[in-house]
Amino acid sequence: MTKIVLPSRCDRAAAEALLPEMVAALGNGPLDIDASGTTQAGQAMLQLLVSARRTADGAQITPSADLREIASQAGLEDILFAGEKA
Amino acid sequence: MTSEEIQAIFFAECEESLAAAEAGLAACAAGTQDEDTVNAIFRAVHSIKGGAGAFGYVELQAYTHTFETLLSDVRDGTVAISEALVSLLLRACDTLSDHVKAALEGGATPDDAALIAELTAAQAANAGAAAAAEEEAPAASPPVSAPVVDLDDDEDPNFDLDSMLDGISGELAGETPPENAPNRWLIHIRPHAGAMRNGGEPLLLLRELVRIGGTCVSCDTNDIPPLDTLDFNQGYLGWTFAIPADVSEEAVREVFEFTSEDYDIAIGADAAMPPVRREVPAAPAAKVEEPSKPAMAPPAQTQPTPAQPTPAQQAPAQQAAPAAPAASNGMQAPPAPPAPGQSIRIDLIKLDRLIDAVGELVIAQAMLAQRLEGEGATATEELTLLEGLTRDIQENAMAIRAQPISSVFNRVPRILRELTMSTGKHVRLEVSGETTELDKTVIERLGEPLTHLIRNAVDHGIESTEERLASGKPAEGTLTLSAEHRSARILIRIGDDGKGIDRERVLAKAIEKGIVAPDAQLSREEIDNLIFAPGFSTAANITSVSGRGVGMDVVRQNVKELGGRISIETEAGKGTTFTLALPLTLAISDGMIVNVGDQTLVVPLAHVVESLRPETKDLQGLGASRQMLNVRGRFIPVLRLAETVGASGAAASTEDGVLIVVDTETAGQAALLVDAICDQRQVVIKSLDTNYRSVEGVAGATILGDGRVALILDIDALVTNAITSSPLKEAA
């Protein structure tokens, strides 16, 4: 299981930087995405996280309260953080 | 373009919007309360709100929302314009300025609770009518069915959701949203790739929807591909939001007002989620080449369907229709920013590079002229042409940096309002020449001295209402601000109709503080100028406004640093006028080129009164080596410039040289002895501080036509130092 830690500010630039890392980790089991320090996130990052959840073995995301709130407002809380692979 | 750069543009636009709002409110206060004026104010505040929302300045956005809501009612005529309302709006504008400053500098946001309460109360005066109108609107507004309209198709930047109701899409939504209740209506939003570019963030707009009461019903994630094919140039997500019935379409439309091109929106429970717009790499280029293409709408999206809307569906479109043209017309109104193509924003650094290059060109042209002169090829036609062209380029380059002084004058009403609150004195402002242009740097540095002068004029100059009435003056004081071009300088006058300077009191205070000797005989002008002495203040009470004696000397210093001069005209009982004479630019100045021994020096022309070759009888000795010059009965000290600057080989006797009479701010007149006057021309000022270090008595340097560096003299410092360090002071 590959662990990927998300930065505090998850903007488009951060999402673009993380994509190759996530692609490289495919095939090693589900991704373990640590977003516990994330305070800001944009659409690009949400798209990336949804895609990660749906790709290969999926991903387990540990969200911060801020990220959970953002996801909730965007209607993605279940898709991103539900126990099962989305 | 980075997010920071876009934010910088936002704040620059905030400044413009604030100026526009302030100007509009000033016009309202002066009696111009037409639709265009109110629209301009509304637009200005609305623009700030839009940017604040996009960049996440929550406090600024919340404040502008309240402000804008009241303005919207004023615009619609539901709140009448009164003197009290204009006063409230002006204060609201001041606080808006503070909010913008806090957002820009990251400081504490101003305490706006009381003001927000006042704004809300002013609006509540007509809340009944407004609420009734809003209640009616939502009843009709949730459309049963609405078309998908690509906002790219709308030529008007203020896209009009109402126009979407003109056609009906046959497509039905694939799902029945759970919140399809009668008291809510649905909106489908699909941000495309462009919405995430240039610092844009769709989630911020969704947050704004939540703020106005919307809730996310669902997020369409069906188009998101696996990681290995994920493309950040695509917007894959689409949202369906339920909006409370009491939130109008207009309120939702405003959320997306500044981003219309990059979002597709469909309204209604039966409308389909707009599809993902696949971006191909060539798309951005095509957009640039064909900016007007969006007018060519894809037929499938805008073609009206044969089915006509029912009267119930048509109603909201018809009701809201007048508002949209009003808004779009407003965008064309004169105070609005110029249309693209008429003006562009340029980074100041680029402009400064241009000015530097022009400076070099001026120097190169002078070098060429000198070289040709050496070759005996003077006065050729080509050289004259080159000189003319060089001057044209230089003037045009300088004109780019020129800004109207209104940007400084526009701040004055606020200063006066604050002074009225703190001093209780009511002051009317009269402004003229606000379109006069001068260099941006001068404009920027002018704010501080101008503020000092205005505060002093109101605090010390203009009497209290009782005093004014007792002396037969109108209760309201008048402050006059004017600007005008005068030869190569700009004259700014700040006048009041107050009590004038009390010379006896000024002199007594100066003697008390040891600024002048008790037996000194001073002219009226000299007494007036004492108020510029450091630490001087005649104020009986030190107030927060003025009276600490740190103002006027700073004013003079600021003006001097700008290469300008300040003078006073005052008449007891009539008022005082300060006149600031400033150079149009700080980059190029007129100078007199003089020779002193082995040195070539530049005397700024602004200081030069006259030049003369003295006769022996006009000179009188003083002490061992000092001399005084009799200029039409008045004796002024003679300064041997060679001694002052340490030049060797200068003319030994006064009769062999030329005397240049110069005027100074602090030390009166003096006569500078030089060997010869070589030329009088424009010189490009090079900063000595930047290129070397600050040198006492030297204002800067320039490069002469022959490539040599010549120092530009700081006449004030030079003369003051020479006089204070010699017995000449007593004699003068």
Image (cartoon, rainbow, N blue to C red):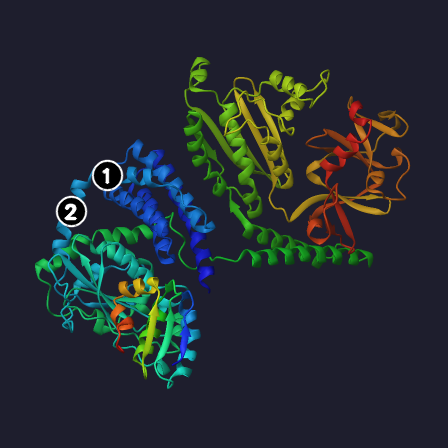
Q: Amino acid at mark 1?
A: Val
Which residue carries the number 2 mark? B133
Secondary structure of the residue carrying tag 1 is loop
Q: Dot 2 falls on which chain?
A: B
Q: Amino acid at mark 2?
A: Ala
Residue B478 lies, in percent from the top left, at 46, 26
Q: Nearer the viewer, residue B474 or B380?
A: B474
On screen, residue A10 versus residue B353, left or right, reads left
Q: Which disc is residue B472 wearing?
A: none
Which residue carries the number 1 mark? B79
On screen, residue B449 versus residue B295, left or right, reads right
Secondary structure of the residue carrying tag 2 is helix
Residue B220 visible at all: yes
Q: Nearer the viewer, residue B6 or A38?
A: A38
Q: Dot 1 falls on which chain?
A: B
Residue B536 lies, in percent from the top left, at 62, 26
